[in-house]
Amino acid sequence: MSSASTPARRDSSATRRAILDAAADLFCRHGYDGAGTRDIAREAGVDARLITRYFGSKENLFVQVVEEVFAKTLLMTPGNNDAVALELLTAEPPERDGMMLTLRSLGNARAAEIMRDNMERNYQKQLASELPGDDRAARAALLIAICAGVQLVRNVLHNSALPATDAARFAPHLAAALDAIASAGLDRHDPASPGSAASGRPEHR
């Protein structure tokens, strides 16, 4: 048989990527319990046995999906919260939305544990390391909770009182709320505060 008539075959990295992409889409749409390995394999265009080959189990595949979908860039640090607040009130949710992955997977105790561990080990830890003062882990968790609440009310429930067109009006209030926790008592208008223009210390992002 000539090579021209032989179907193209994925290499291992492309197959793994296809499975991850399919799993991310289905887990975000249907949650951990609602997306079976056969569904994921069908979406990826591969044999279901390859999920075991590349990831070992559905649970391990979910761990990898959470690692990617939960990757964060927003850091609610002093001096950065004006930009954070504006983004929270204007940005459209990504196609693979961590909020929807969370809401649709919370019914499974093991999935909830995986998501909590990922958040505490990655995003929360990174944010805490950037905060001044004491109780940084707890304050980082509070900041994440506030942002998650805004995303839930705005992007999932589509609250009519928070249209993106009014973001410039309400962003300062949200920024002040974030700064109250992030600054640990520092005055957000104090020239010596971390991240302020006069302090000479860079903003974190």
Image (cartoon, rainbow, N blue to C red):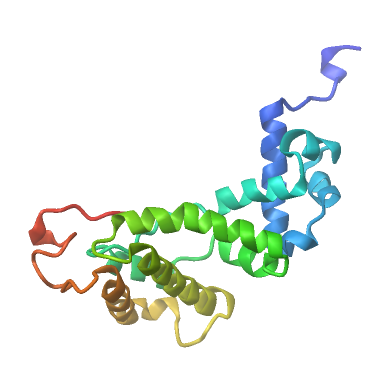
Give the quarter of the image for residue 134: bottom left
Look at the image and tell me whether residue 154 can be seen.
Answer: yes
> Residue drawn at (27%, 76%), measured in percent from left and top?
180
Q: Answer with left or right where residue 172 lies relative to residue 40.
A: left
User: Which residue is located at x 46 percent, y 76 percent?
Assistant: 150
Give the residue drawn at x 30%, y 73%: 181
On the image, the x and y values in percent for residue 100 come to 62, 66
The reply to whether residue 97 is in sight is no
Can you say which quadrant of the picture contains the N terminus?
top right
Point out the residue furthest to the bottom here: 161
Q: Is residue 154 left or right of residue 73?
A: right
Q: In the image, residue 2 lies at what x, y percent?
A: 87, 12
Q: Which residue lies furthest to the right in this view?
A: 1
Residue 86: x and y in percent read 35, 70
Question: In the image, is 111 to the left or to the right of 146?
Answer: right
The correct choice, above or below, for 116 with respect to 180 in the image is: above
- Which image quarter holds the C terminus? bottom left
Q: Is residue 15 above or below residue 95?
A: above
Residue sticking out furthest to the top: 2
Number of labels in the image equals: 0
Q: Which residue is drawn at 8% across and 60% down?
A: 198
The percent coordinates of residue 152 (x first, y second) are 54, 75
In this view of the protein, which residue sits in the foreground, 50 or 170?
50
